[in-house]
Amino acid sequence: MSDIRRIIIDSDTGGDDAAALILAAKSPTVDILGVTVAAGNVPLPQAAQNALAALELAGCDAPVYLGADRPLNGEEKECFSVYGKDGMGDADLIHPVGKPQEKPAVDFILDTVRENPGEIEIMALGPVTNIALAIQKDPETMKQVKRIWSMGTAGFGPGNATPVAEFNAYKDAPAYKVMLELGVPVTVIGLDMDDEPTWTWEDRLQQMMEGSPIQRFVATSTRKLLEFKKGNGIAAVDLPDAVAMGCLVWPDFVEETTQCYASCITQPGETYGMVIFYREGFTYDSMPKIGACNVSVVSKAKKTEFVDRLNKVFAE
Ligand code: RIB
Ligand code: CA
């Protein structure tokens, strides 16, 4: 039996997704069977181009499949792209040689899981529309997924799309709810795992511009994000999707997970897209019993090692 883990990455490829794709592509313990893309950070065709370009730069020939160009119920939630119009710093970086596959993303996901029951891990880096569509099309097959890793939700901290909702869950809350209700193991890496200790500061980004082609690509593709963050008084970029990928590819990086029952708010209103975590074993004053736990939430990781670990991979 091989120790290589077989994964599908589902992505709305902007700058931090691209860094995550490169990290996975460079990791000797995972085999990327395919990358499925959905609209999110950028429209679908651009997400596909960005994914192809990132994989090619990393020397990875994993196929890219086109998925959903809008949320599950068709209702668009307006969010502007902090990564620039093309999701990659608007620096004319994206010129992939390859093209997306003909097969639709949902069919690729289902066929791959059918052929490898109980073996496939899915890393979700964007709104989970493709995953929800696959569940709706063939729930029994999707119950054979080994684990879903989700960069999504605010974790136990504040949101970014709204004070309480994180972008990926907010962009397609009905899809997030479908995923949570599937009943396979889900590991959630929320925004609280992507706070100050994991940020890359401007001086490091400048050093990266003098470094390897991958380091230059990542520093350039996040330059609009840096501008945006500086507008908020922070001279650093965060890469939540790469942090999430670190949790998958570096088994020692995660130090603690918390079992929870997670519930995603899909009713319109101020809390739309918020995911509430009810902790196992915690007695809530007004709730004698919570539902069965459906997620492991990463609650502690070696955050201070993240930037060095990532750059070591990118420097190779
Ligand atoms: O909230 C952070 C997430 O939203 C990341 O996946 C980022 O790429 C955007 O999709
Ligand atoms: Ca993303």
Image (cartoon, rainbow, N blue to C red):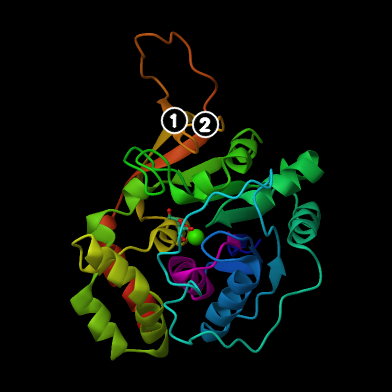
Towards the viewer: 276 or 118: 276
Residue 204 painted magenta: no
Residue 143: quadrant of the picture: top right
Residue 182: quadrant of the picture: top right
Location of the C terminus (image quadrant):
bottom left
- What residue do we see at 37% from left, 49% from top? 160
Instruction: Report the mark closest to the observer, 1 or 2.
Output: 2
Q: Which mark is residue 212?
A: none
Q: Secondary structure at mark 2?
A: loop
Left/right of residue 191 with respect to residue 182 in the rendered view: left
Which kind of residue does numbered mark 1 sit on?
Ile
Towards the viewer: 46 or 80: 80
Image mark count: 2
- What residue do we see at 39% from left, 79% from top? 314
Compared to residue 114, the image places residue 139 above or below, namely: above
Left/right of residue 19 with respect to residue 144 in the rendered view: left
Q: Position of residue 267 (x, y in %)?
A: 56, 29
Labels 1 and 2 touching (C-beta < 8 A)? yes
Location of the N terminus (image quadrant):
bottom right
Badge 2 density bin: few <14, some 14–19, many ≥20, Cα 10 Å:
many
Q: Secondary structure at mark 1?
A: strand
Q: What residue is shown with label 2?
A: 265
Compared to residue 260, the image places residue 222 above or below, namely: below
- What residue do we see at 61% from left, 54% from top? 122
Q: Position of residue 197 (x, y in %)?
A: 23, 58
- What residue do we see at 56% from left, 52% from top? 127
Q: Position of residue 214 (x, y in %)?
A: 42, 84
Compared to residue 268, the image places residue 173 above or below, namely: below
Q: Is residue 145 visible?
A: no
Q: Which mark is residue 276?
A: 1
Mark with earlier residue (1, 2): 2
Residues in magenta, as a range: 10-27
